Amino acid sequence: MVVALRYLKGTWAPPLPPVITEQSPRRLVVFPTDDISLKCEASGKPEVQFRWTRDGVHFKPKEELGVTVYQSPHSGSFTITGNNSNFAQRFQGIYRCFASNKLGTAMSHEIRLMAEGAPKWPKETVKPVEVEEGESVVLPCHPPPSAEPLRIYWMNSKILHIKQDERVTMGQNGNLYFANVLTSDNHSDYICHAHFPGTRTIIQKEPIDLRVKATNSMIDRKPRLLFPTNSSSHLVALQGQPLVLECIAEGFPTPTIKWLRPSGPMPADRVTYQNHNKTLQLLKVGEEDDGEYRCLAENSLGSARHAYYVTVEAAPYWLHKPQSHLYGPGETARLDCQVQGRPQPEVTWRINGIPMEELAKDQKYRIQRGALILSNAQPSDTMVTQCEARNRHGLLLANAYIYVVQLPAKILTADNQTYMAVQGSTAYLLCKAFGAPVPSVQWLDEDGTTVLQDERFFPYANGTLGIRDVQANDTGRYFCLAANDQNNVTIVANLKVKDATQITQGPRSAIEKKGSRVTFTCQASFDPSLQPSITWRGDGRDLQELGDSDKYFIEDGRLVIHSLDYSDQGNYSCVASTELDVVESRAQLLVVGLTSLGPFNPGPVPRLVLSDLHLLTQSQVRVSWSPAEDHNAPIEKYDIEFEDKEMAPEKWYSLGKVPGNQTSTTLKLSPYVHYTFRVTAINKYGPGEPSPISETVVTPEAAPEKNPVDVKGEGNETTNMVITWKPLRWMDWNAPQVQYRVQWRPQGTRGPWQEQIVSDPFLVVSNTSTFVPYEIKVQAVNSQGKGPEPQVTIGYSGEDYPQAIPELEGIEILNSSAVLVKWRPVDLAQVKGHLRGYNVTYWREGSQRKHSKRHIHKDHVVVPANTTSVILSGLRPYSSYHLEVQAFNGRGLGPASEFTFSTPEGVPGHPEALHLECQSNTSLLLRWQPPLSHNGVLTGYVLSYHPLDEGGKGQLSFNLRDPELRTHNLTDLSPHLRYRFQLQATTKEGPGEAIVREGGTMALSGISDFGNISATAGENYSVVSWVPKEGQCNFRFHILFKALGEEKGGASLSPQYVSYNQSSYTQWDLQPDTDYEIHLFKERMFRHQMAVKTNGTGRVRLPPAGFATEGWFIGFVSAIILLLLVLLILCFIKRSKGGKYSVKDKEDTQVDSEARPMKDETFGEYSDNEEKAFGSSQPSLNGDIKPLGSDDSLADYGGSVDVQFNEDGSFIGQYSGKKEKEAAGGNDSSGATSPINPAVALE
């Protein structure tokens, strides 16, 4: 655009469309003493003519009385001078200026002229305001309205401002609010002053008389909002403008105001709180500030709140403002006008000030997506357009012209210019052309062909030709041709390509010690026709040899830096350059110091000094030190430590850390400590070496400043209380020794304290009542006095066993394996201690079909004290259970409440075995064993099967109603298919878990195969083993052992019937040192033969059988053994009955001195060994359980009768898992059957 105008001005003076250059603001407020001045200035050629409208009607300033119009060729401004104070009222309205010449009309924005008279307060009678002391009151102001913002002040008759604070506040509306009045507020001259800046006038309201009645009892009341008065309000905030929210509350005591934003954090950088937090001001509101804001007024009696719901809207603003353009004939003109706002602005177009809807419909232009488009523009289409956008918050206007001209092509770049570039760089050849229509630009080589055939050449829209990666053969002449429909012009551009500068050897990075020197070298190659240069830079600044300093030495591509310091570290660059190019090679220099900890850790603090030693009497001293070397990493902090060689030699304690820029501090010290100090510097790599130690200073003794913590009172016997505490650290003794003054008395009494001074951190108080609360105080005491008054702690004397019996509410059956047990809370007075929880013990007495005779295993669950129910899961269906619930405290368990319940039937477990035996090519015999867990009354079995290679299709299933059935024959099977068989046992609850087997008939299995068969022998036995073939059907066959040698004929043993799947067979009763033939038969057909020889020295001849081998003798001996066993059992039962005694008796025999209070963590310390020992106890044969040593005694878990229980529930974990541990080492462990370890029978 600028280039076009310069081009036009350089040839001839063309006409120009009008452009508004100056205009009055959109809002103009005038006062009685002001003149009215409306500005409108514009440029253009031919000369611009001006006209005005007021409220959309033609307005002629020259014809108005008192109007002066400026006589200037580019101005339509005018001034109205009035002859009275009300003249401006006649000229109020909305003005608009139009500037026109033959090329179009430009239009100003709307100018709203507002006339305001002299402000006056309306006449009113102000009555005295009477309130009682402590009540709230609002003094109204109600100033006259004004178009300009005004300022409100509250003063008294002496022109002194009314003091405002949290109690007394002026609101944004000018009213004066009192949250509660005091008698000091009693004045008769509260005056509201209104300052009008536009008229430079201050007016005041009639004084208000506030009368406060004194009272002896001011009533407290919770906050109430005086402004706003409702619970919520909705506000619209303008984007980019400030938002002011206000909440003023009354109440007594005076409320405080808080502001909250539920939708997110307040924008801290734009929020300010004013007027004692009653006003929130948010600057430069954006869309993200939309949402809810809450103010909360609070005092000690309650709160009141108000919710502001803020909607952020915006006046119209530009996204793309239309710009004036020059076009050539035939081109398409486009002016984009895109605006945004909230609500979305309405956009209208005008042409030469006339709304488009008032123009003819057959025009060539159209509006499309906010753009005005003019096709096939011609000189006669030159126009000035106006895009106007408005919503309820404002109006936006832009003038832009479409100027259609015809101009011949002209190249503005000088002809025959020479351009130079180095190889590998990008060269740019200029060719600025102009014309209307816009000329096309082509670049040609010396042969007249386009250069764009080479992809390295690329044109720019402004006519410039770029050549990337230029080479030496690109040197030559290039021609720029610019042409339009009126003419074409050409210029020549010369290009010379030079060798690129290269750094052949650059500097290398180095790490050097402080005080040494470093040398950087640099070598480069240049084009011989260019002037070369090598310079050095350090951290971006040029380096030069200094006059008298030998810091830098620069010569022949070398840089030497002497006497390195930390300030020398950084990046150093070698810069090789010519007038055409610059190359740079960079290296990094790091300067380090050396320490034993590492090159980057700080050095040691070299010097440490103690001063202000007179402050030791005040337990203070000042420590100063010299800075440590930072070794290339700034020191972040210094750590000040001390050692007491008397109390804790060679152990250092930190007194604190100070910032790294600080080299002294005053320390607060403890009394009676032998202080030796040291200081250590720390940077990001860690600490350095410490400073030398200081002299030792000793602070004077003093009374203790602290008392012991963690004071507790707990009894470990029913008649004592052990008071314990955490002893003071030695550095808190404040003297060579410290003792403890212990005081106690029963809680709730006002009697004297009993006390005792001790040195150990515990005290045993004897002869107490059982579980009585005591007030306890422990105070530190030394030779200088006592510590501060200690806090009172509540402790308890020893607990006794609970006497409370939990009352069961009932048992709810949840399913066949879970029940819900509920009980009522126990009477705490009967607990005789802290109720730690409830112990729920339950055990299975047997199936509902029959009771078990074996040892009973008991499970335990510990329930927290605040819970009175528990779910018992993992129960056996169709079983009878016994249940006991006991309350326990820290002493142990109380008496139990007992209950029995039964679980309903469930589904059974899987059958124990399922075997397939081949019968023929189409039939199989299925054998099985019943499930171990019936979980009810078996009603039969469900048998299902299907061929495997049919994907489960064709499955057959049928019920076997006989629960005693153990075999089933399947016929009509396919001889060539493999089947999957599934067998389930059933109760009335349905089928249980299935056992699955796969197999086929004899035809699928093929001929019986005894591959891998072998035989081994001992002295009188032989083992025949084989590996069943995979997929081979099970069958039964005979094995016959036949002796060879002198007695072949009669030494054969009876043939034995064997199953193929059992994999081996052992034949006993063979003769030693004898050869045997082994024959295998199936269905009277010979299948296999093999030989084996037994071990031994020769065949042993057995003597004739005597009476000892006769059956009657064996039976007689068995009867005698059984009789002796019965007598032994009866003796054991009698002895067990005589040894019974009560738990209480055993408890009373315990040595009291061994009892100790157990800590809260005690229940987490039970080991697996203790649980296994518990599980190994054995019941008596008559069914009685010993009170001590039995598996339902919780005392067994602790190793003594006097068990302590805790509150933390860790005891629960000690019961869980016990069943599994007993399975390994308890009563249920496997072993030989005996009267005290019976075998488990199937039920």
Image (tube, rainbow, N blue to C red):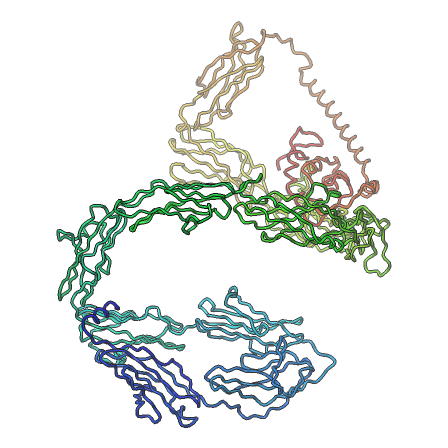
Q: Nearer the viewer, residue 1157 or 266?
A: 266
For the point 46% across and 45% down, the residue is 550
Residue furthest to the top in view is 1046
Q: Position of residue 777 (x, y in %)?
A: 80, 55
**Quick check: can you spot residue 356?**
yes
Residue furthest to the front in view is 548
Left or right of 949? Residue 8 is: left
Left or right of 93? Residue 73 is: left
Instruction: Classify residue 1202 by image quadrant.
Output: top right
**In which quadrant of the rendered image does the C terminus lie?**
top right
Q: Position of residue 747 (x, y in %)?
A: 81, 58
**In which quadrant of the rendered image does the N terminus lie?**
bottom left
Q: Position of residue 944 (x, y in %)?
A: 46, 39
In the picture shown, does residue 82 fall above or below 331? below
Q: Nearer the viewer, residue 571 or 532?
A: 532
Q: Nearer the viewer, residue 216 or 692?
A: 692
In the picture shown, does residue 238 fall above or below 742? below
